[in-house]
Image (cartoon, helix red, strand yellow):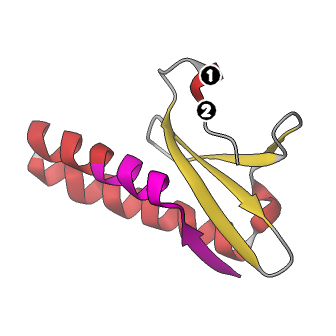
Amino acid sequence: MKVGWAPEAISDLNRALRYAAERDPAAAGLVADRIRRAVLNIGYFPGVGRLHERTRTREYLVRGLPYLLIYTVDDDSIEIIALFHTSRDPEAKRAP
């Protein structure tokens, strides 16, 4: 299934990668790869993320990282609406 990124989610991704690169440039590539793999997994298995009842979004934990991909699914596409660091307040999660 086609996966797209909302502009705000792209900003989240850029911020996460910039943060990783500033602290450990070698680790930034690992972070990017794990996020990429998580996105591929969502594309193959859209229902893999936990359904958030209130917002009707899905949340998928990026393996080995403290990030959730928050996304929506419709008939023919997936939209990632946020890359959310799990140390943040859960009420700050973005909803569609």
- The residue at 61%/38% (across/down) is 94
Residue matched to label 1: 90
Q: Is residue 67 left or right of residue 76?
A: left
Question: Circle 2 — which element?
Answer: loop
Q: Are marks 1 and 2 in contact (CB under 8 Å)?
A: yes
Give the camera-side residue of 50 and 55. Answer: 55
Q: Position of residue 46 (x, y in %)?
A: 76, 66
Q: Is residue 13 magenta?
A: yes
Residue bounds of the magenta highlight: 1-14
Q: Position of residue 66 (x, y in %)?
A: 46, 34
Residue matched to label 2: 93
Give the vertical position of 94 relative to 9 (above or below): above
Q: Is residue 50 left or right of residue 59?
A: right
- Give the residue type that dot 1 points to: Pro
Q: Position of residue 81 (x, y in %)?
A: 59, 53
Q: Is residue 28 left or right of residue 63?
A: left
**Number of the label disc, if any, that sits on residue 69:** none
- The residue at 58%/25% (across/down) is 92
Q: Is residue 79 magenta?
A: no
Would residue 15 be visible to someone looking at this image?
yes
Question: Circle 1 — which element?
Answer: helix
- The residue at 49%/21% (across/down) is 88
